Amino acid sequence: MLTQTGRRRIAVLVSGRGSNLQAIMRAGTDGRLEADIALVLSNRAEAPALAYAAAASLPTRVLAHGDYPDRNAFDAALADVLTAANVDLVCLAGFMRRVGPALLDRYPRPILNIHPSLLPAFPGMNAQQQAVDHGVKITGVTVHFVTAELDAGPIVLQRAVPVLDADTGETLSARLLPVEHEVYPEAIQRVLRRPWRLVGRRVQFDSHEPTLR
C-alpha cells in the first residue's frame, strides 16, 4: 500500500536495542529507502527499540509472547496485528522469536530477516562466535526471506566481511554491525522497488536499479 507521499509501508519487529531499526529510520529520512515505518512491534515491553520509535513518533505495539499459551497462539495474534497494519513488508530487526507456520501460512506479505553470517553458514544464535570458532577467513551479513526453517529462506542480499586473526565474537560483532546497518535498508529498498521473482531458491531482480520518486 502506498502512502500519500507514494512511499511503501513497512512494519519492523524488534526485541532489543533497535540498532537496525534506527538504521532503517535513517535510511528513510535521508532518501536511501523510500518507505514509511507504519508499525514498530515488540514482544518485550522493555525493549529499548520502542523508546527510539516513540521518540520519532512512530506507531508502536507490544505483543508479549508470555501472554499466549504457546508459539502458535502468539504467531496467530501476530498475523492478526500485521494484517490490520496493512503494510507491504515486514522486517525482523533483532526480533528474538522464531516465527512459524501459524504466522507464515496466514500472512500473505513478504517477511525479511537479517543475519550476521553468510548463510547457509552459521545459522541460529551466536553466528559471530561460530565463525571465529570455525576459523573461517570470511563471514558477512545476509538478508533473506523468512520461512519456517530457521535462517534458511531465499537470500535477497549478502555482503562479505573478513574475519581477522585477532577477532573474538565480540570484536567481529562490532565490525559486522555497521555492515548490517548499510545492507538492510538496501535490501528493503530492492524488495519494495524492484520487480523480483523466485526461481527455485534464487531471488532474481530485474536489471534496473531501484528508482526513488
Image: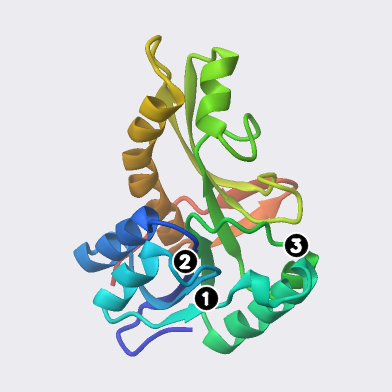
Q: Which residue is mark 3?
A: 100
Q: Which residue is mark 2?
A: 192
Q: Which residue is mark 1?
A: 88
Label 3 and label 1: CA atoms lie apart by 19 Å
Q: Closer to the camera, 87 or 195?
A: 87
Mark number for residue 201? none
**Circles 2 and 1: CB atoms closer than 8 Å:** yes
Which element carries disc 1, helix, strand or loop? loop
Identify which amino acid the numbered label 1 is placed on: Asp
Which element carries disc 3, helix, strand or loop? loop
Marked residue nearer the N-terminal end (2 or 3): 3
**Circles 3 and 1: CB atoms closer than 8 Å:** no
Circle 3 packing at 10 Å, graded few (<14), some (14-19), many (20+), is some
Marked residue nearer the N-terminal end (3 or 1): 1
Quadrant in the rendering for residue 55: bottom left
Q: Closer to the camera, 103 or 95?
A: 95
Residue mark closest to the camera, 2 vs 1: 1
Label 2 and label 3: CA atoms lie apart by 23 Å
Identify which amino acid the numbered label 2 is placed on: Leu
**Circles 2 and 3: CB atoms closer than 8 Å:** no
Inspect this view and state whether residue 209 appears: no
In screen coordinates, is 61 left or right of 204?
Answer: left
Quadrant location of the C terminus in the rendered image: bottom left
Residue mark closest to the camera, 3 vs 1: 3
Q: Position of residue 177 (x, y in %)?
A: 36, 40
Residue at the image point whose x is 34% and y is 48% from the top: 181
Which element carries disc 2, helix, strand or loop? helix
Q: Closer to the camera, 15 or 99?
A: 15
Asked if 65 appears above or below 137 in the picture, the reply is below
In screen coordinates, is 66 left or right of 166?
Answer: right
Label 2 and label 1: CA atoms lie apart by 8 Å
Residue at the image point whose x is 69% and y is 75% from the top: 107
